[in-house]
Amino acid sequence: MDNKNDLPKRRPLSAQLDLSKFSKENFAPATEEEKRQQDVMSKSTTFFKDGMRKLFRNPLAVISMVILLVIIVTIIVAPMIVPYKYEEMLSVNGRRDKGAKNLAPFKYSKLEQEYIDNGGTRFPHIFGTDEQCRDYFVRVIYGTRISLIVGLFASIIVLIIGLIYGSISGYVGGKVDLIMMRIVDIIYSLPDMLIIILLSVVLNQVLKFKSGSILARLGTNMVSLFIVFGLLYWVGLARLIRGQILSIKEHEYVLAARAIGAKPGRIIRKHILPNCISVIIISTALQIPSAIFTESFLSFVGIGVKAPMPSLGSLANKAREGIQSYPYKLVFPAVMICLIVLSLNLIGDGLRDAFDPKLKR
């Protein structure tokens, strides 16, 4: 064609369109505004970025993250500022201060007040003191540390075991899946609290930890709690992962990976588990408050953290004995438990709304 604007002629019996019948307005180039609109519409994103953007649009989840962040910063920084230790009984100039028993918040004992009147300085007791003349604020801070650590490690244990078990059961299928799921049904029928109590009694006679170590401070009760989480609490996550894999493994990209010779382990890691990420994130986030509540309950009934190390549950149990005389002692650990559990639950709900593809807004 001599002219580039000339249109090719339609051949007889051809299925192509006859472009000569269309006006130039039908094929006008896109305007600058239409090009900018296309650029905005085609902005690339990822599953994680899209989920985080939805999460930060959830006001309850954002407020919960702020509260949880404030609590974490406080339990890290406060022991560096407050000069008292969680097991330290108060003393002034090397003298045991027996009058510093059950002090109200921001109150001093007579011995401390005399020391201050003589020009000395004394850090205030923000939450008062307990029945053994120990600073209550530091004990609540360390109790919060224990509860958060227990929740975090318990969720990690549940995630690892449940992820591996559920992936194998769902991907292999057949008789292997049948046998593995019957084991899960048996584990579901076991009473977890009874097993924790029995393990605490047995391990207390069997296990001997090195004096001064972290395990010795936690005690056999907490070790038995971790063991029970590793034995029992992963079955819920394993069932969720299995159900997801049973549906995902039938997709075409999994069949293509098998066709090119990819090993089952690689298929699970690279193709199946990334498509289960929403279930994994949500289940792990919701497992943390469950573990914290379980630890607080066990410490409340006396089979939790070993004394003198505090826990929010053990502090609440001690405060129960003097609830009529010192009700504020129960308020501080109870409010801390409520804040942590409620914040983590709201964050878990926000993660579910943000990352679950079935919940489209």
Image: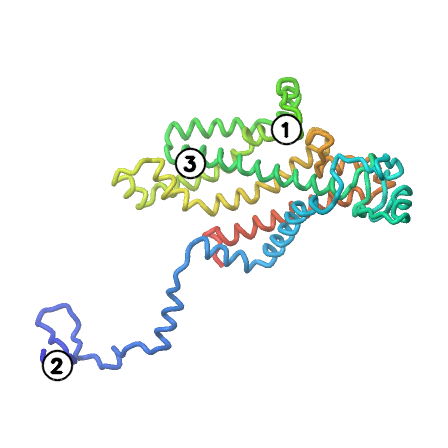
Give the image quarter of residue 86. top right
Disc with the residue nearer the chain's start (1 vs 2):
2
Query: What residue sits right under mark 3 in the picture?
Result: 167
| Front label number (1 vs 2) | 1
**In the image, residue 325 lies at what x, y percent?**
87, 41
Mark closest to the chain's N terminus, 1 or 3: 3
Look at label 1 and name its amino acid: Ser
Mark 3 or 2: the one toward you: 2
Q: Secondary structure at mark 3?
A: helix
- Does residue 307 sit above or below 138 in this rendering? above
Mark 1, other Cα within 10 Å: few <14 / some 14–19 / many ≥20: few
Alpha carbon separation for disc pair 1 and 2: 88 Å
As drawn, the label of residue 213 is 1
Q: SS at mark 2? A: loop
Measured Cα–Cα span from mark 3 to mark 2: 64 Å
Q: Position of residue 214 (x, y in %)?
A: 63, 31
| Residue 126 position (above or below residue 100) | below
